[in-house]
Amino acid sequence: MKKKVRATSRRQRKDKWGNRMAIIGITLVVGSLAVVVNVRGVSLKDKAVEYQVREDSLKAQLDQENERAKNLEEKRKYVQTKQYIEKVAKEKLGMVKEDEVLLKPANPR
């Protein structure tokens, strides 16, 4: 009878050892997953900050371009006015109206 008791106790020890190894293995796997998730989380947070900075930069550029488009539209409207045409004719082409007199200095310096 002693042999059966020993066999049972050896089997129980073997089963306990197997259970402990399984628990240790599962703990290592869960721990490894926790580390990987934590590292990836930090990496994703860094990327989120980087993307936020990029988004802010692009928004600033968009605002600048909208302001530039507004200024160009105002200039386009001004270029079509009679005042602009007269200004360009006087400054660049040296033209005068029929009732205007052009005075030139006698001694150009």
Image (spheres, rainbow, N blue to C red):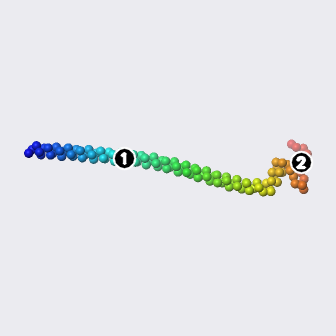
Q: Are marks 1 and 2 in contact (CB under 8 Å)?
A: no
> Which mark lies nearer to you, 1 or 2?
1
The number of numbered discs placed on residues in the rendered structure image is 2
Q: Position of residue 93 (x, y in %)?
A: 84, 48
Q: Position of residue 67 (x, y in %)?
A: 66, 54
Instruction: Report helix, strand or loop for mark 2.
Output: loop
Which residue does the image show at 37% across and 48% down from the upper left?
A: 34
The local crowd at label 2, few if under 14, some if 14 to 19, many if 20 or more residues have their Cα within 10 Å, is few
Q: Quadrant of residue 4?
A: top left
Q: Amino acid at mark 2?
A: Lys
Q: CA distance from mark 1 to mark 2?
A: 89 Å
Q: Would residue 19 appear left or right of 74 to someone viewing this image? A: left
Q: Quadrant of residue 77?
A: bottom right
Q: Pick the quarter of the image with the C terminus.
A: top right
The label shown at residue 33 is 1
Q: Would residue 32 appear left or right of 7 to someone viewing this image? A: right
Residue 58 or residue 12, whichever sits in front: 12
Which residue does the image show at 88% across and 43% down from the upper left?
A: 108
Residue indicated by mark 2:
104
Q: Residue furthest left?
A: 1
Instruction: Report helix, strand or loop for mark 1.
Output: helix
Q: Amino acid at mark 1?
A: Leu
Q: Quadrant of residue 24?
A: top left
